[in-house]
Image: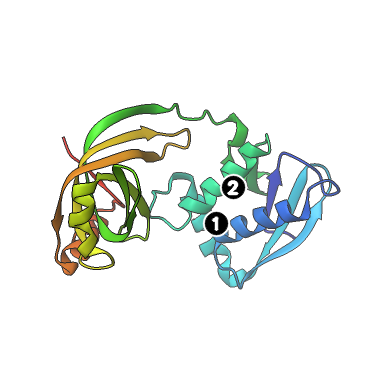
Amino acid sequence: MADYEFKIGAYNPKTIPMARLAEYMAALADLIGEKDRVHFEKLKAGSTILAIRVQPEARVRSRRRIQEARSAEKDHPTYKPFHRINSMLRDDGAEGKIYSGSADIIKFPGVKQPLPQVVGPFNKHTELDGVLVRIGGKDKIAHALIEDADGVIWSCEVDRDMARRLAPYLFGQPLRLTGEGRWLRNIEARWELVKFRPSEFTPLKRETLGDSIAAIRKLGIKANFALQG
């Protein structure tokens, strides 16, 4: 007997594409955890329903983990898989849920969840820390690429004078670039740096960048940039 069933309010066992089913199963495995002790049992008729069996020694932990996903913060391991499943359901025009018997454990609003409105764009004083990994351009405005401590690449527009001053730092000492950034919050509620034109930069000690990121993470915040003001 299945411990859980995951209902996808779209397709049916005969129409769901194999690749899409695999995507749902991978995200579901990340959400439940205990991957060596959680097993796919079968697809059930009706809507696409995945029957899931959990080994006895992992049942308490798996249920607690699923329940925690309902209100998980961004640093919780269930946050990303929950939102990935919800996003997939929205793309498929559906909603879904995980249930056990007649009890709903967690619901995914999917298509019924209102999308956040786009905010901006607007200009904001911005600081960006990272390593210069590329610089170039034939026009009066050059483009510099900065890789931050999380491996995210940010594009900056600089004039030729700053490009010449930045060039010696290519793949070298970390920098802090300061200037005017143009930001917007997209429909997925993520902040996007549309354009960044730094007016100055400051070399950083290598440990400074790592220490600042570590200090931020201790506060439970993940940041790739700093907005001032």
Image coords of residue 51 (percent x, y): 73, 56
Horizontal arrangement in the rendering, residue 173 relative to residue 13 (left or right): left
Query: Which circle, 1 or 2, is nearer the viewer?
Result: 2
Mark 2 = which residue?
Answer: 85
Q: Type of residue at label 2?
A: Ile
Q: Element under label 2?
A: helix
Circle number at residue 114: none
Question: Which residue lies at the image location 58% right of the left edge and 36% below the top edge?
Answer: 109
Whole-angstrom CA distance, mark 1 to mark 2, is 9 Å
Image coords of residue 75 (percent x, y): 37, 55
Sequence-wise, the earlier of marks 1 and 2 is: 1
Task: Kindly tell me whether residue 173 is visible in this rendering.
Answer: yes
Image coords of residue 211 (percent x, y): 19, 64
Task: Kindly tell me whether residue 106 is visible in this rendering.
Answer: no
Mark 1 = which residue?
Answer: 31
Outermost right residue: 14
Image coords of residue 82 (percent x, y): 53, 49
Neighbourhood count class around disc 2 (C-alpha, 10 Å): few under 14, some 14–19, many 20 upward: many
The answer to whether the residue labelled 1 contacts the one labelled 2, judged by CB atoms less than 8 Å apart, is: yes
Pick whichever, 58 or 50, lies toward us.
Answer: 50
Pick whichever, 225 or 70, lies toward us.
Answer: 225
Question: Which residue lies at the image location 28% right of the left edge and 60% below the top edge?
Answer: 132
Which quadrant of the view contains residue 175? bottom left
Question: Which residue lies at the image location 31% right of the left edge and 47% below the top edge?
Answer: 142
